[in-house]
Amino acid sequence: MAKMKAVCLQSFGGPEMLQVQKIERPVARGAHVATTVSAQDKEFVRALGADQAIDYQAERFEELVSDVDLVFDLVAGDTQERSWSVLKDGGTMVSTLAQPSESQAQAHHAHATNYVAHPDAEELRAIADLIDDGKLRPCIEATYPLEEAAAAQQQLEREHVPGKVVLEISP
């Protein structure tokens, strides 16, 4: 069986999922993963396991990837429209922002869906198992005690952080 090809558009979009999940979970399952990021994050996503890091500011993903089984869209708009050209006939388009076009899905014999994160204990257990098994690594940029929440916010406002900033709550 051929290796699944997936493209994640804008890996560092939105708080709805762990950014690391978007790359490492498919990689852990044997997928070839291409992702769009800013130039400063290319090495970071490669370290997470991305096979191909595309600088969305300098490169057009549709010129670099094709025959993709899964498009995971975190941008919508024009980016989502351009994504149809890389999707394999019969592939899947998932968006966290805008429901993909049903007419485009039909034209590509594709499955199109909108994903909205919600609390799910079973999914959280599955993610915890992947972490415990070493197949998923949460990327933590910095940890602050809750009393220093303002400093954590200042860090997020003044610099680009590839990992998560975590507030610790002491018992």
Image (cartoon, rainbow, N blue to C red):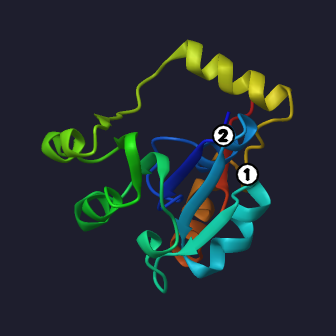
| Mark closest to the chain's N terminus, 1 or 2 | 2
Quarter of the picture containing the C terminus is top right
Q: Is residue 161 visible?
A: no
Q: Position of residue 163 (x, y in %)?
A: 67, 58
Q: Is residue 83 left or right of residue 142?
A: left
Residue at the top extreme, as displayed: 122
Q: Secondary structure at mark 1?
A: loop
The amino acid type found where label 1 is placed reads Cys
Q: Position of residue 102 (x, y in %)?
A: 16, 39
Q: CA distance from mark 1 to mark 2?
A: 30 Å
Q: Position of residue 93 (x, y in %)?
A: 36, 43
Q: Is residue 3 left or right of residue 134?
A: left
The amino acid type found where label 2 is placed reads Ala
The dot on residue 2 is 2
Quarter of the picture containing the N terminus is top right
> In the figure, residue 151 lies in which quadrant?
bottom right
Q: Residue shown at 35%/59% (left/top)?
A: 83
Q: Residue shown at 62%/53% (left/top)?
A: 33
Q: Between 37 and 154, which is closer to the camera in this rendering?
A: 37
> In this picture, is 28 found above or below 49?
above
Q: Secondary structure at mark 2?
A: loop
> In the figure, residue 116 lies in which quadrant?
top left
Q: Is residue 120 left or right of residue 33?
A: left
> In this picture, is 15 found above or below 156?
above
The dot on residue 139 is 1
